[in-house]
Image: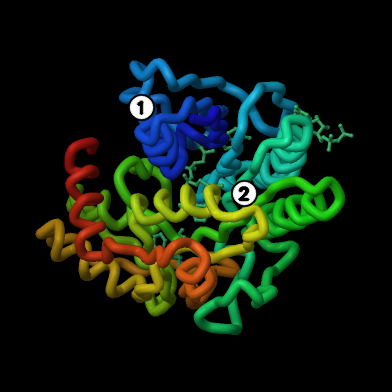
Amino acid sequence: MKKILVTGGAGFLGSHLCERLLNDGHDVLCVDNYFTGTKANIRHLLTNPRFEVLRHDVTFPLYVEVDEIYNLACPASPVHYQHDPVQTTKTSVHGAINMLGLAKRLGAKILQASTSEVYGDPEIHPQPETYWGKVNPIGIRSCYDEGKRCAETLFFDYQRQHSLRIKVVRIFNTYGPRMHPNDGRVVSNFIVQALRGEDITIYGDGSQTRSFCYVSDLVEVMVRMMASPDDFIGPVNIGNPGEFTMLQLAQTILEKTNSSSKLVYRQLPQDDPKQRQPDISLAKTHLGGWEPSIQLDEGLKHTVDYFRSVI
Ligand code: NAD
Ligand code: UDP
Ligand code: UDP
């Protein structure tokens, strides 16, 4: 059994990952500054003697002893990462340097939670890993997109320069229980609005698309990536290729919640990508035939049940 560090472990994805790693029998150290994560997300894990939590900001050095590192620390919702954009870039860049420095000292394997945002507003559809992306370097999303791109650069340079054992996954939109009700991302916004009978806020005309992956499918493939042979380092797309317009998503959520909320249209945010769908061939080939098993209908049902219980 290993000692595993999960940065951003009190967040949405991180808390599910910590839970999975504990269930697999590992010792887990969760590091988080609670910027967007919550203690409630990990409260149920605190009774496990193999679980430990440290309040810490990854932009500062961290000296601990572990065998593997999953680097997830970074706000993921546009509302939150644009709240303090300088801190967002610092978290991705200084955070990556510190975690890579830690991995280098320990000889530990390190996985970076990168993002489909490295493709920006893509001209190639669906997006394969070989596509270099179309990202605005000076827009309001850049702190996140360019921060994550720079983190990828650092990972690959530490690998080339210091022979670090790295893994880079590019995560596409993922949803599920423990998303924060005020997270600001589309799935949580629409479900919370529908359950409260508030207007559903469609940005733009709602024709833009996203491909949504349920959290358990994503955690499974992250764990498989970490366990894959050392010469498979990525970057590898992970997500569910099922693609929907925001109008389709709103409609499905209205049906699932039996809500009579109205759709209202709001301005499309600057640089909002028009379409997004992962090409997951690489993951399927290299990660034991992995493919997502929970489709939107079922995943939304679990997520709606969760939000009913917390709001
Ligand atoms: P989240 O906001 O729920 O979790 C991020 C966690 O990181 C939070 O617990 C937050 O408090 C913590 N954090 C932020 N800045 C920190 C810092 N400086 N030091 C320590 N901790 C810090 O978001 P999430 O959806 O769970 O995303 C987790 C990771 O996955 C992020 O790196 C995100 O970029 C990546 N990702 C997520 C998605 C998705 O759809 N959920 C898609 C692509 C990439
Ligand atoms: N670092 C860390 N924990 C460690 C080792 C390093 O947080 O156990 C940080 C440290 O702050 C350093 C950064 O990681 O600045 C990069 O480390 P590296 O060894 O690559 O560079 P250097 O120490 O030469 O700056
Ligand atoms: N969106 C929307 N209404 C909302 C929140 C988001 O129509 O209340 C749209 C947003 O403009 C984007 C899509 O939904 O086109 C996905 O947004 P999200 O913030 O979830 O993720 P990202 O844009 O980072 O993929």
Farthest residue, direction left: 258
Say if mark 2 contacts mark 1, CB within 8 Å.
Answer: no
SS at badge 2: strand
Q: Residue at x 53, y 54 (%)?
A: 225
Q: Which residue is mark 1?
A: 40
Q: Nearer the viewer, mark 2 or mark 1?
A: 2
Query: Relative to the observer, which residue lies in front, 18 or 121?
Result: 18
Whether the residue under disc 2 has CB within 8 Å of ligand 1: no
Amino acid type for the residue under numbered disc 2: Gln
Residue 171 place in picture, x, y as percent? 51, 59
Q: Which residue is mark 2?
A: 112
> Vertically, is 25 above or below 140?
above
Farthest residue, direction right: 161
Q: Residue at x 49, y 27 (%)?
A: 28
Figure label count: 2
3D distance between C-alphas at marks 2 and 1:
24 Å
Q: Residue at x 44, y 44 (%)?
A: 13
SS at badge 1: helix
Q: Give the side of residue 280 with respect to residue 189, left or right.
A: right
Q: Quadrant of residue 234?
A: bottom right
Whether the residue under disc 1 has CB within 8 Å of ligand 1: no
User: Which label number is shown at residue 263?
Assistant: none
Quadrant where the C terminus lies?
Answer: top left
Amino acid type for the residue under numbered disc 1: Ala
Residue 287 place in picture, x, y as percent? 48, 62
Farthest residue, direction bottom: 124
Q: Give the side of residue 77 with respect to residue 73, left or right.
A: left
Q: Residues within 10 Å of mark 1 (few under 14, many from 20)?
A: few
Query: Relative to the observer, which residue lies in front, 226 or 51?
Result: 226
